[in-house]
Image (tube, grey):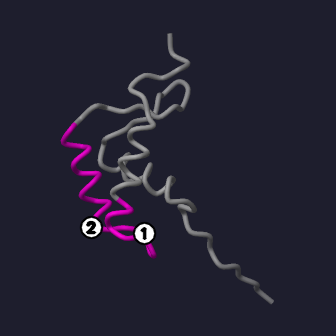
Amino acid sequence: MLMTRERRPPIRTLRGWAIHVLQEAGAIRECEEHGWMQDRADPHARDRADDIARRNPPTGVSADEAGAEVRQVLDSIGDTCPECP
C-alpha cells in the first residue's frame, strides 16, 4: 500500500518568509563564496519587498506584521560579508 505524507510548507518561519521576500524583490543577495546574506542598498528593491509583504502576507499574519518583519530582517543584514577580506 502506498503511504503519503503531508508536505511540509517550504518556509517554516516568518523570518524565513521575510528573507524569501527580500531575495525575490532583489533587496538582498547571497555572498557567492560564503553564503552570508548582504543588503544591496537598493531603495526601490526595499520598497518592492515591503509592497510584496503587505499584499501577500503569510496565513495568519497581518499586513502590518508582515511589513514589520521584512523591515526587521533587512535591518539585521549588513552590506558586506563578514568572512570576505
Q: Which residues are magenta?
A: 43-66
Q: Amino acid at mark 1?
A: Pro
Disc 2 target residue: 55
Q: Which label was assigned to residue 58? A: 1
Looking at this view, is 27 or 5 the one in front?
Answer: 27
User: Is 13 situated left or right of 53 in this image?
Assistant: right
Tell me the SS state at disc 1. loop
Left or right of residue 49: residue 19: right
Give the residue drawn at x 42%, y 29%: 78
Q: CA distance from mark 2 to mark 1?
A: 10 Å
Dot 2: element: helix
In the shown orientation, is residue 51 left or right of residue 24?
left
Label 2 Cα neighbours within 10 Å, binned few <14 / some 14-19 / many ≥20? few
Report x, y in % for residue 35.
54, 32
Q: Main secondary structure of the magenta part?
A: helix
Q: Is residue 16 above or below residue 33?
A: below
Quadrant of the rendered structure where residue 27 is? top left
Type of amino acid under label 2: Arg
12 and 64: which one is in front? 64
